[in-house]
Image (cartoon, rainbow, N blue to C red):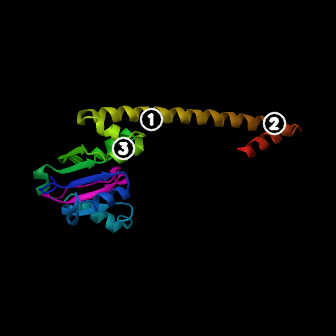
Amino acid sequence: NIEGERSVLVFFREADEISKFRDSSYFAKFKEKAQVLNELTASKSADRGNIIKKATVHGMVTLATRMFGRGTDFKIFDDRMKKAGGMHVLQTFFSSDLSEEVQIQGRCARQGNKGSYSQVLLSTSVAKDFDVSVSTIESWSSAEVYTHLARLRQEKGSEEVRQLREQATGRLVEHDALATSLQSFQRGDSSPFDQLLQRLNKI
């Protein structure tokens, strides 16, 4: 817990959300005990290493952007933390990519250490990422939230794959048209190449 012996690592979608949360009345009593891990505070290697090391000290609260949810090694050196159950990782946004969610979960319980993970989602963040209204999100019961969002994530992923396939097909058609026009040009017929240039100039 945030006032106890464990450290808490909170992941946000972006730095602006950290700023708003850190300055909120809800977080006011914890503000002085918290540190921020984002692209600005970790711009220097020494600062980055110091923040990451402090993140696993008992009682520390670290507010981090999502980029540090992948590949950042939060090692626990504090024996009090190990006895208290390790670090708790909290995610405030729902990952569009399941692999990112798994990576963020993996920031706790590293290398055999104890740890735990949970999600406390910002409805405004979820609404932006999944094109759903805040009122719809808030109408779901706690038990339903993950199921609904997992379905939306799968649908979004399927749509992105469909769009990529359409783009790939379109580029293949353009490639074939260019190859054909160049062959005609080499044979002395420039009209297909001229037509292709005129069409591309209109796009």
Going 30% across and 62% down the picture, which residue do you hit?
A: 36
- 41 in relation to 146, above or below: below
Q: Which quarter shows the C terminus?
A: top right
SS at mark 2 in the image: helix
Q: Label 2, on which residue?
A: 183
Residue span colored magenta:
59-79
The residue lying toward the viewer, choosing from 169 and 50, is 169
Q: Label 1, on which residue?
A: 157
* Dot 2 amino acid type: Gln
- 198 in relation to 74, above or below: above
Residue 127 x, y percent position in the rendering: 38, 43
SS at mark 1 in the image: helix
- 130 in relation to 28, above or below: above
* Dot 1 amino acid type: Gly
Query: Closer to the camera: disc 2 or disc 1?
Result: 1
Q: Label 3, on which residue?
A: 126
The residue lying toward the viewer, choosing from 160 and 171, is 160
- Evaluate if marks 3 and 1 touch, with contact meaning CB atoms under 8 Å apart: no
Going 56% across and 33% down the picture, which residue do you hit?
A: 165
The residue lying toward the viewer, choosing from 35 and 203, is 203
Q: Residue placed farthest to the front in the image?
A: 135
Q: CA distance from mark 2 to mark 3?
A: 51 Å
Residue 200 x, y percent position in the rendering: 73, 43
Query: Closer to the camera: disc 2 or disc 3?
Result: 3
- Circle 2: is it few (<14), some (14-19), or many (20+) Cα within 10 Å? some
Residue 62 x, y percent position in the rendering: 25, 58
Query: Closer to the camera: disc 3 or disc 1?
Result: 3
| Chain-order first, disc 3 or disc 1 | 3
- Circle 3: is it few (<14), some (14-19), or many (20+) Cα within 10 Å? many
- Circle 1: is it few (<14), some (14-19), or many (20+) Cα within 10 Å? some
